[in-house]
C-alpha cells in the first residue's frame, strides 16, 4: 500500500510538472525571460510611460482630452496588472506598486480635468513614481536574466488631429 501511495504521488508530481508553462520551469532567469516576453511586459511599460507623457500635453486641449488620456491610462494599467504575478517576487512587488500608482494617477487626472492644478500635480507625481518603479523593474530583470527588455511600442501615443 505504501509503494502504491509513493508511486501515485510521484506520478501526480510528474503530471503537474508536465502541465506547467514554460514560465514555471527552468532557472529563475529563464522563467523571468519567458514571462516578460510572453506577457509583452516591455510594450506594456512603454505604453504606460507614453500615457504618462501624453497627459500633460492634453491639458491645454481641455477636459475632454484629459478625460480621454486619463481613461486610457487607467485601462492600460489595469490590463498590465492582469499579467501579474511575475515569476520573480521582487518584480511582482515593484510592478504591483507601479500599476497602483498608474491607476491612482488615472483617477486623479480624470477627476482634475484640465482645471484642477492641485490634482493634476498629484497625478504627475504618481506617474513619475511609477516611471521610477518601471526603471527598477527593468534593472531587476536585466540583473536576473542578463537581457534588456525593450519598451518600444508599436503605436505612437502622440495626439494627432482633433480626436487626439
Image (cartoon, rainbow, N blue to C red):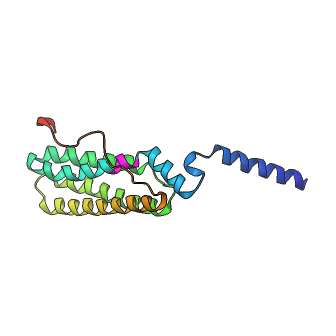
The one nearer the camera, 132 or 116, is 132
**In the drawing, does residue 27 fall left or right of residue 135?**
right
User: Vertically, is 35 above or below 104?
Assistant: above
**Which residue extends farthest right?**
1
Which residue shows up at 11% across the image and 36% down it?
Answer: 162
Which quadrant of the structure image shows residue 141?
Answer: bottom left
Residue 33 horizontal/vertical position (percent): 48, 51
Q: Which residues are magenta?
A: 41-45
Residue 101 horizontal/vertical position (percent): 31, 60
The one nearer the camera, 122 or 10, is 10
Main SS of the magenta part reads helix
Which residue shows up at 19% across the image and 46% down it?
Answer: 67
Which residue shows up at 30% across the image and 63% down it?
Answer: 132
Magenta includes 11? no
User: Vertically, is 91 above or below 54?
Assistant: below
**In the drawing, does residue 57 fall left or right of residue 128?**
left
**Which residue extends farthest left?**
60
Which residue shows up at 48% across the image and 61% down it?
Answer: 144
**In the drawing, does residue 86 fall left or right of residue 120?**
right
Amino acid at each position: 500500500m505504501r509503494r502504491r501511495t509513493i508511486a501515485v504521488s510521484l506520478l501526480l508530481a510528474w503530471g503537474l510538472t508536465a502541465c506547467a508553462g514554460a514560465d514555471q520551469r527552468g532557472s529563475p532567469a529563464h522563467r523571468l525571460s519567458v514571462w516578460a516576453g510572453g506577457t509583452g511586459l516591455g510594450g506594456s511599460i512603454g505604453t504606460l510611460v507614453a500615457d504618462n507623457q501624453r497627459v500633460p500635453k492634453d491639458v491645454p486641449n481641455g477636459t475632454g482630452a484629459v478625460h480621454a488620456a486619463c481613461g486610457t491610462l487607467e485601462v492600460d494599467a489595469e490590463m498590465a496588472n492582469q499579467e501579474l504575478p511575475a515569476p520573480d517576487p521582487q518584480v511582482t512587488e515593484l510592478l504591483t506598486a507601479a500599476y497602483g500608482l498608474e491607476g491612482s494617477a488615472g483617477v486623479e487626472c480624470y477627476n482634475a480635468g484640465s482645471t484642477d492644478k492641485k490634482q493634476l500635480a498629484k497625478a504627475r507625481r504618481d506617474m513619475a513614481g511609477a516611471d521610477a518603479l518601471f526603471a527598477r523593474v527593468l534593472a531587476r530583470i536585466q540583473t536576473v536574466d542578463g537581457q534588456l527588455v525593450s519598451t518600444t511600442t508599436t503605436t505612437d501615443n502622440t495626439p494627432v488631429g482633433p480626436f487626439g
